[in-house]
Image (cartoon, rainbow, N blue to C red):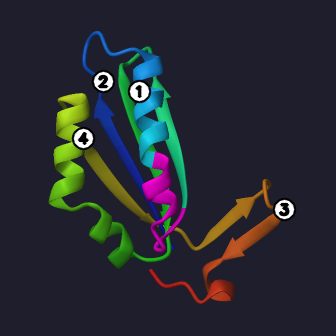
């Protein structure tokens, strides 16, 4: 599994409500992505930053999602360049589902 952290600046004047509305509009397409296990949306009012933490089945799926259309949406919506980081994720302790997700048990690859 791969954890991807994406952050970008929020333009002056954009409210939390506008950021969250953008998130809500994007959620169905992320839910439809078969490579994505989970996405957490991020908002930092003090530093005027937003983004997401994604848990992917593998690096190929993560990289497919970072295409030109995605980059253009971020630039258009937030007038900002995203910063993307990747981490191997061999294990996830998930209290919401009451399980430990282990890449070895799931047939997932990095």
The answer to whether marks 2 and 1 mark residues whose Cβ atoms lie closer than 8 Å is: yes
Report the residue at 26% width, 60% height from top. 66
User: What's the mark number on residue 98?
Assistant: 3
Q: Secondary structure at mark 3?
A: loop
Binning the other alpha carbons within 10 Å of mark 4 as few (below 14), some (14 to 19) or many (20 upward) gives some
Image side of residue 44 versus residue 70, left or right: right
Does residue 28 show up magenta in the picture? yes
Residue ID for mark 1: 19
Residue ID for mark 4: 74
Q: CA distance from mark 1 to mark 3?
A: 30 Å
Q: CA distance from mark 2 to mark 3?
A: 34 Å
Report the residue at 45% width, 67% height from top. 33
Q: CA distance from mark 4 to mark 2?
A: 10 Å
Looking at the image, which is closer to me, 48 or 90?
Answer: 48
Percent of width and height locating residue 92: 66, 65
Percent of width and height locating residue 98: 84, 62
Q: CA distance from mark 1 to mark 4?
A: 11 Å
> Which quadrant holds the C terminus?
bottom left
Q: CA distance from mark 3 to mark 4?
A: 34 Å
Percent of width and height locating residue 100: 76, 69
Q: Nearer the viewer, mark 3 or mark 4?
A: 4
Binning the other alpha carbons within 10 Å of mark 2 as few (below 14), some (14 to 19) or many (20 upward) gives many
Q: Secondary structure at mark 2?
A: loop
Image side of residue 38 versus residue 26, left or right: right
The answer to whether marks 4 and 2 mark residues whose Cβ atoms lie closer than 8 Å is: no
Residue ID for mark 2: 10
First to last magenta residue range:
27-37
């Amino acid at each position: 599994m791969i954890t991807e952290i994406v952050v970008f600046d929020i333009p002056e004047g954009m409210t939390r409500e506008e950021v969250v509305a953008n998130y809500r509009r994007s959620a169905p397409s992320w839910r439809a992505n078969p490579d994505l296990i989970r996405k957490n949306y991020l908002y930092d009012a003090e530093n005027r930053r937003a983004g997401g933490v994604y848990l992917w089945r593998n690096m190929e799926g993560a990289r497919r999602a970072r295409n030109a259309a995605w980059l253009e949406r971020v630039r258009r919506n937030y007038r900002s360049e995203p910063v993307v980081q990747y981490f191997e994720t061999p294990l996830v302790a998930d209290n919401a589902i009451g399980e430990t997700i282990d890449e070895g048990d799931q047939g997932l690859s990095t």
